[in-house]
Image: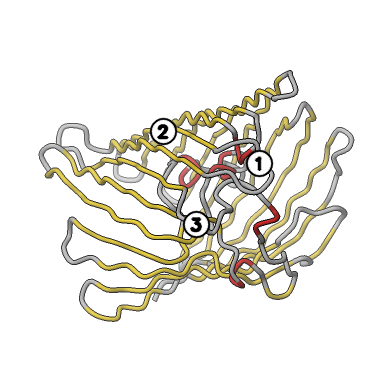
Amino acid sequence: MVRLGGNNVYSAEEPRLTTIDEFVQVIASPELRLMEGLSVFAEVRLETTAPPEEDRRFQDEGLFVRSLYGRLAPSERVAVHAGKFTPSFALASLVTPGMYGNNYNKEIELIERVGFGAEYTLGSRDVGLHKLSASTFFEDTSFLSESLGSNRGTTTLDDGGASNTESFESFTLSLEGSDFAELSGLRYKLGFVHEAAGRGDDGDETGLAFAAMHSWKLGDRCSLVAIGEIAPLWNFQGTADNIVYSSAGLVVQVDRWTAIVSGTYRRRDLSSGGTWDDYQVQTSLEYAIGNGFSVALAHEFNRSEDLDSRQIGIRISYQYEF
């Protein structure tokens, strides 16, 4: 996928900045099939590696490997994988819709972890298919944590942070289901995560995730999708703070047009006392031009650490599969 975009934070409270940020994002996801049931997957990205500190045009772009792992699936129901990957935990961070839909809950997505995992699918088309996943991991501290171009630097043990241990002390468990005969269009996911404390951290992070989404066909060219998730985490990212993410989204698609409303409420109870009641709401409109091209416009209201900001954005995207 190639995406050309721009964000304009046109209103912000101090010490936030009003900025114009123009950028390009390229995501390549190659798959190499070595033999029947054995494949190597990768995700390579070119994108900005730091938030803007002033107006910028196609600056701070870095090329990095977000995932690189092997997967062995000896049958349709059993699979194992190892390498650099994203352990299965929450759902909303991956599917909350809209241009800014996952601006908050992507914080609980376990990207760029190194380890191994397994999954087993049970059930049938009559009672639904249910996939049980488990993995153990630590944060990537290899040369793959760097980036070319705008270098984000190598992650080290001294950086601290949840699961930054270079040992298999962190793990996830999840159960997700879909393809129900009587509840067509329903998908659910339950997740548990334990991330060991890194150097200087206050404690191990523990979290839960409860998510569901449902899609409805409203005609030949119209559909509706709703999603909701709640995810409480204790000792968030190794701190002494506790945090809860509550996300919801609604998508209406009519022919080539897609209208989206989504948002997340993020409550953070501070160990020093007090609470941050943050939330963000975004609305967006997308149009599929055809031949892999699409264009999207969006607006977001964001309240973070008791400071408000507003931004508008545009994306022109091209997706090519081969």
Q: Which mark is residue 226?
A: 2
Q: In terms of sequence position, does the residue under pointer 3 or pointer 1 come before the other?
A: 3
Position of residue 10 in the picture relative to residue 96 (left or right): right
Instruction: Looking at the picture, tell me which residue is in the foreground, 21 or 43.
Output: 43
Q: In terms of sequence position, does the residue under pointer 2 or pointer 1 come before the other?
A: 1
Q: Is residue 82 visible?
A: yes
Q: In terms of sequence position, does the residue under pointer 2 or pointer 3 come before the other?
A: 3
Query: Which residue is depicted at the point 31% across and 48% down?
Result: 133
Amino acid on which the number 3 mark rests in the picture = Ser
> Is the residue under label 3 in contact with that under label 2 (CB below 8 Å)?
no
Q: Residue 119, image x and y in percent?
A: 27, 53
Label 2 – label 1 distance at C-alpha: 37 Å
Secondary element at image label 2: strand
Query: Which residue is depicted at the point 44% across and 38% down?
Result: 252
Q: Is residue 218 visible?
A: no
Secondary element at image label 1: loop
Front label number (2 vs 1): 1
Secondary element at image label 3: loop
Query: Quick one: label 2, few (<14), some, or many (20+) residues within 10 Å?
Result: some
Q: Which mark is residue 201?
A: 1
Amino acid on which the number 1 mark rests in the picture = Asp
Q: Residue 76, image x and y in percent?
A: 17, 60
Query: Which residue is depicted at the point 20% across and 76% down?
Result: 36
Task: Report which residue position mark 3 lands on.
Answer: 167
109 to 271, vertically: above or below: below
Position of residue 263 in the picture relative to residue 191 (left or right): right
Label 2 – label 3 distance at C-alpha: 38 Å
Position of residue 226 in the picture relative to residue 276 (left or right): left
